[in-house]
Image (spheres, rainbow, N blue to C red):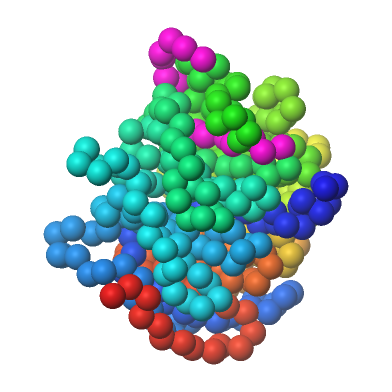
Amino acid sequence: MNKLSVFSRALGVLAVALISITSLAVLTGCAKGAYPTMSQVATVPVVPPVTPAVIPSLLEALDPTTNILYVSNATASAVYVFDMTSNTVVATIPIGVPNQLPVTPGEMAVNPVTNMVYVINGDGSITVIDGTRNVVSTTIPSVGGPALRIAINSVTNKIYISTGIVTYRPGDYGANNNFIVVDGATNKVIGGLALLPSCVGLAVDPLTNTIYATTYRSVEIIDGTTNHDMASIASGNGDLVDVAVDETTHNAYAIQSGFDSVSNQVFVINGPTYAKTGTIALASTSSRVAVNPQTHGVYVTLSPANLATIDGTTKTVVDTMSFSGGPTDVTVNPLTGLIYVTEGSDVNVITPATYVTKDVHVVP
C-alpha cells in the first residue's frame, strides 16, 4: 500500500479527548469551503444516568474509515463503540480486570489501517482494543505515567505518548523520558525523548513523518524516523497546551492559553520550514484543537462555553458557537465533515449541509 493510499484511509485520525457523557447532541453546520453559524438542535442519550455526585469522565477517538466513534468512560471503566451511521452504541468494552481495582480509561487514539484502538489508563498502562472484534487485545504495561495524550502514525504504525514531566525510572527506552515511542507491531517501547518542562499535546503528520509536541513553553518538532528534535517554536505570554496538524497543507496549529487576554492565540507553524508563519487571536483561553484537512477548517474550544471556527486558508476566526456548558474536547471526521465537541455529559455532533435532526436513545 503506498503512502498516499494509506493517507487517504487514515486522514484525520487524531485522537482527541474529552470529559463526560450521557447524551449525544446533533447539530449541523458548514459545507465544504463555507462556515455558516452553528447551533444545537437535538440531544441523544448515550450513557446511562448517574447520581448527580458522580459525573462520568469521558474521552473519545474517531475512526473515519469505519465511521465509528470510541467513547471512554472512566467512571464505568468502559469504552463504548458508537456507530455514527446508525447513531447507536453497538458494543461496550470493559477495561480492566474484574474484582480488581478499577481502571480509569482516558485519552484514546485509533489506527484506521490496523483497526486497533489505544486507550490510556489512569495507572499509565495502555489498553489495546481490536476494533474488528471489539475486544481487548492486550495491555501495554505502564510507560512511566501517568500518560496524558496519545497520537498514532498510521503509516509507520508507531504510537506516541506524552507523560507530562520527565519520569525517572530504570528499564527500557522509556526510562527518563516523557515523550514515549511504542512500536504498534510489537507493543514495545522503542524510543523516547526528555522534553522540558513537560510533554503535553501531541499531533502527527503521517506523510512527512513529523511529530509535534507541546511542552507549555514551546512546540517541539520531532523527526519520526530518528526521534531527533529538529526545531523548537517558543511560546509567548502563555502556555502552549495542544496542537493539531493539517495533513494536506502540512501546517500545524498550536493553541496558547494566555496569561493575559491578548495572549490567547493560535500559532500557525509551517511544517516543512519549521517556522511560525502567523498567529490568530482568540477571544478567551483554550484547551483543545482539531483540523479538517479537507476544508482546512480549524476548531478550537474556548472558555467558558464556546467553539471557534478558523479558516486555515485566511487565518481568521469565521464563526463562534456557544454551548450551555464548557466544551472539553473537539475532533473532526474529514470524510464526513462531522465535528464532535464534548461538553459536560454531552457530545455535540455538528454535521455539514442539511440541518437534519434525529433523536436516538442508544443506551437502555
Residue visible at 59% across and 71% down?
A: 338
* Residue 306 seen anywhere in this rendered image of the structure: no
Residue 290, position as x, y percentages in the image: 58, 57
In this rendered view, identify the residue nearer to me: 315 or 230: 230
Residue 33, position as x, y percentages in the image: 74, 74
Residue visible at 27% across and 58% down?
A: 56
In this rendered view, identify the residue nearer to me: 252 or 168: 168
> Magenta span has 166?
yes
**Outermost top residue:** 170
Residue 133, position as x, y percentages in the image: 51, 55
Residue 292, position as x, y percentages in the image: 67, 62
Horizontal arrangement in the rendering, residue 197 relative to residue 208 (left or right): left
In this rendered view, identify the residue nearer to me: 258 or 221: 221
- Magenta region: 156-172
Prevailing secondary structure class for the magenta stretch in the rendered image: loop
* Residue 335 seen anywhere in this rendered image of the structure: yes
Snapshot quadrant of residue 47? bottom left
> Magenta span has 72?
no
**Outermost front residue:** 133
Snapshot quadrant of residue 46? bottom left
Residue visible at 76% across and 52% down?
A: 7
Q: Quadrant of the C terminus?
A: bottom left
Total numbered badges shown on the rendered structure: 0
Residue visible at 49% across and 73% down?
A: 349
Tell me if residue 122 comes above or below residue 82 in the rendering: above
